[in-house]
Image: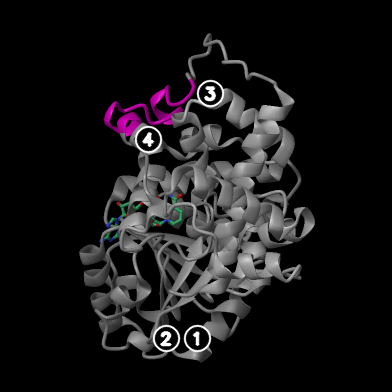
Amino acid sequence: MSEKIGVAVIGSGTMGAGIAQIAATAGHKVILIDSNDSALDIAKSSHEKIFARLVEKGKFSETQANEILGNINYHIGLNEVCDCSLVIEAIVENIEIKQKLFSELELILPKNSVIASNTSSLSIASIAASCDFSDRVIGLHFFNPAPLLPLVEVVPSLLTNPIIVDDMVALMKTWGKIPVLAKDTPGFIVNRVARPFYGESIRIYEEGLADFATIDWALKTFGGFRMGPFELMDLIGNDINYTVTETVFKEFYYDARYKPSFTQKRMVEAKLLGRKSGKGYYTYAADAEREMPVENEELGRQIFERVWAMLVNEAADALFWNIASKEDIDLAMTKGVNYPKGLLAWADELGPDKAVEIIEKLRNKFGEERYRVSPILKQKSQLQERFF
Ligand code: NAI
């Protein structure tokens, strides 16, 4: 597929505006479409501000910035997409609305164009099924903020033509992205493997072992994570994070490993959404005093190791079920959510047997299905093998 194909991005919100910026920077003519003209105005002025800042910082000359901005055209309605070889959909996360859009698109697009969805939680098969040309539909899952986080999960459905998969992997590389191939299953790689970072941390809090500040401190200090789980949930928004957890739980036929927490549900109900509402696990008023962690090394290490073991188990299980290759699972977590190390490499470093021991202890203590060791992790531990 040529580097300079015409690209349309539909939905000019958080993700669509970012994806349009990436494609325009890579030299494509981009049509950014939204059904709401004020969303388009916001996207346009945010692009202008971003490029003014990038010029100030010396990342681009003024001429280059103007050229990139000139690559983006902002439109209401689908009329302008008919020359595009690639359409990336980033509209509201609703299956009926996405299906309606995809069936409209295939009527006006050239027969060899690709229609991609940036969905985080819907199956690509369910979106593709609304099209006659379902072999041209694929998932391209970017991460927020899209221009800064390099990962793109490339997700073929059962119906996608394999040539399109190769084309999209190659194209994402030309956009400076790091593509990983993921199976069309709930949460793909990142949103599945990351669940214990939040879930197990909340569980530790619910058991009364530590408060939010101490758990955040433990994961940053002993795990090297840039943000603690509660800081991160406040940044993402508890409503968004809770919805992802609940969707993954339901989509996995209520597997206890992904069970959402009452703590986060109540936070959402109380509208304690995090930074955007001024209060979540922490308070964000300018004069608010920040809670101090209990800096007890033994407790801190225990907290880190428990969350680490559950993360490693989840990454191993994704490998066991062939969701992605071991290399891609590790790339996904370091490039999509900035983990300090790939989880499978981290399992090798601290030892798969250590993770198994921690989880089996929890299993003995609580008797819950949540603490189920992945067969591949158990095997690595028993045979004293490594993932890499
Ligand atoms: P957003 O709410 O910021 O933007 C969605 C935009 O789509 C709005 O401007 C809306 O006016 C427009 N829109 C809705 N229906 C439309 C239609 N039929 N035709 C044209 N425009 C329409 O949403 P956001 O956060 O950008 O999410 C978009 C998609 O990306 C969703 O599928 C979401 O699951 C996914 N995603 C979101 C991430 C995030 O962190 N926000 C990360 C990765 C994926």
* Disc 1: CA contacts within 10 A as few (<14), some (14-19) or many (>=20): some
99 and 337: which is toward the camera = 337
User: Which residue is labeled 3 in the image?
Assistant: 211
Left or right side of 14 for 376:
right
Residue at the front extreme? 364
Relative image position of residue 371 (x, y in whole percent) = 49, 52
16 and 309: which is toward the camera = 309
Image disc number at residue 196: none
Q: CA distance from mark 2 to mark 3?
A: 46 Å
Q: Report the amino acid beneath label 4.
A: Gln
User: Which residue is labeled 2 in the image?
Assistant: 160
Q: Residue at x 52, y 50 (%)?
A: 144
Q: CA distance from mark 4 to mark 2?
A: 37 Å
- Sooner in the amino-acid sequence: mark 4 or mark 2: 2
Q: Residue at x 36, y 26 (%)?
A: 272
User: Which residue is labeled 4 in the image?
Assistant: 264
The segment highlighted magenta reads 266-282
Q: Is residue 20 above or below residue 297?
A: below
Image disc number at residue 164: 1
